[in-house]
Image (cartoon, grey):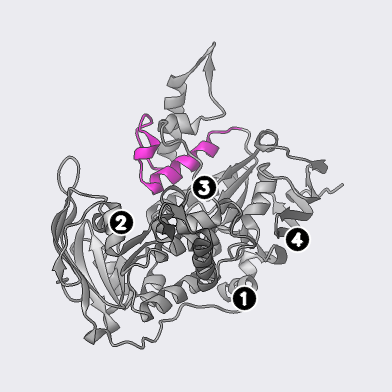
Amino acid sequence: MYDDPNVVLHCEKIDKIYPGTKALDQVSFDLLKGKVNVLIGENGAGKSTLMKMIAGIEQPSAGKMYMDGEEVVFKDTSAARAKGIGIIHQELSLFPNLTVYQNIYMCHEKRKGLFLDDRKHIEGAKAILKRLEHEIPPDTMVGDLRVGQQQMVEIARNLVEDDLRVLIMDEPTSSLSAAEVKVLFKIMRELLQQGLSIVYISHRLEEIMEIGDHVTILRDGKYVADADVKDIDLPWIVENMVGKNTQYHRFTRSIDLNKAEKVLECNHIYLPKPGGGWLLEDVNMYLKKGEVLGIYGLLGAGRSELFECLMGMRPEHTGEVIYQGKPMKIGDIADQLNAGFALVPEDRQRQGLVQSLDICKNASLASLTDFLTGFLMNYPAEEKAVDEQIKDLHIKVADKHLPILSLSGGNQQKVVIAKGLMTKPTVLLMDEPSRGIDIGAKTEVFEIIHEFSERGLSIIVISSELKEIMAIADRIYVLSNGKCTAELSGDEITEDNLVRASYAGLGTGKSAS
């Protein structure tokens, strides 16, 4: 029996054991009524696992949960929803082959006699999307939307429920622009006024301080600390999360990039936009051997599209690409992999991983031909190569033959990076490599980028976070509306210059050449 009028849900000494690992160890957690309850910790700390217990996706190995003074057991998501608990997943759980309104009303459809009332579905979807300031046509296929729009559809799915008491938001802003985040925060404050209680998981510490009311920190599956946001600061959060105060710092380079040869040149790259205009317009840039080149810009600036051109995913692009001193005719993805290009995509679930395969197979998927002996696979060689990547990238894994989804989001991202590195690339393209990764794991990824660049690997990194791109990049190009508006290096790399150049017509620093 547990009864506290200020607590909507109480978790008492929750354990969760998976084969080879204990994801939660005697964790107690109070979900405060009418508050934004922030849950933070490094990847693998147990945040998402605890939320899956509350949402009925997983069941505890030990421990109890209480609501309204009574013990509750959620055998599945339906049981949790019956108690008013909804969850917005870190990894999108949408149906790409269905429309926006069909996704929004999935599992809580309106009926008109024996048939679905699609008129009500469409009207309801329009209303909730207008509230979210994303008036996407309800009959649009979800698979045709960009990731940020899909995230808004995922949020809308939960907001159409009338009897919602608890809303769990697991990294809801990881794919959203700054403007979209502001809209989401406005909606969250409205929900609080309506009596809803929110659990908010995020790696963006500034967001936590802005929207959170109470913070609970987990580390290695255990409770560490909790406090009201008004009583703490960012250093307190970081120290409790990782055991030390970690900050981004620029790495000292042992190689002289001024003397390094150019590995890649892109001259006058154009990519047409369907219906007219340009996704990329006269983009010119170069990359040197061993250099970490940053690409910065707002959502829709053309950053990912540039990578898609280089990987053979946009055959309609025009312009000249010079690779290792010779003009390059870009083929398909397989041709580009063979030529020495590799891509770490932004969306690891849809583009980086095969969820039905284990950790080992996901890591080696792009380099399987390297382990062929005649017509047979050399499995010992494959496993040895994967073991080396696990060690090199510090991937926290009990057994490489476990399902890929048994890993935390950050470790899944490291597997995607390992997959790219196993192709032995000359040029590694990394699109938002720290998306959904905590501050400790981000530091590890930055160290990996630095280490491999020191070995001579040429890397291009896209990042939306100013401090990240400033910490890891030797030189930065800024894109705005498909155009290259600045090339910054050395002392020119400042937050002010980057922000100014990310808006069309406000380029600073040297013009890209």
The residue depicted at 39 percent of the width and 57 percent of the height is: 369
Is 491 drawn above or below residue 397 in the view shown? below
Amino acid at dot 4: Asp
Nearer the observer: mark 1 or 4; the answer is 4
Q: Which contiguous range is marked in magenta?
A: 133-162
Of labels 2 and 3, earlier in sequence is: 2
Residue 162, given in percent of the width and then of the height, sits at: 59, 32
Residue 174 in view here:
no
Instruction: Let me know if residue 137 is in the magenta part.
Output: yes
Numbered circle sitting on residue 304: 2
Residue 280, given in percent of the width and then of the height, sits at: 19, 55
- Residue at the limit of the structure toward the right, as seen here: 1
Of labels 1 and 3, earlier in sequence is: 1
Q: Which residue is mark 1?
A: 239
Is 37 drawn above or below residue 470 in the view shown? above
Of labels 2 and 4, earlier in sequence is: 4
Mark 2 and mark 3: span between their CA atoms? 23 Å
> Tag 4, which secondary structure?
strand
Label 1 close to label 2 by CB (< 8 Å): no
Label 1 close to label 4 by CB (< 8 Å): no
Q: Which residue is mark 4?
A: 25
Mark 1 and mark 2: span between their CA atoms? 34 Å
Question: Left or right of 361: which side holds 134?
Answer: left
Numbered circle sitting on residue 355: 3
Q: How many marks?
A: 4
Badge 2: residue crowd in 10 Å (few <14, some 14–19, many ≥20): some
Amino acid at dot 3: Gln
Of labels 1 and 4, earlier in sequence is: 4
Instruction: Let me know if residue 124 is in the magenta part.
Output: no
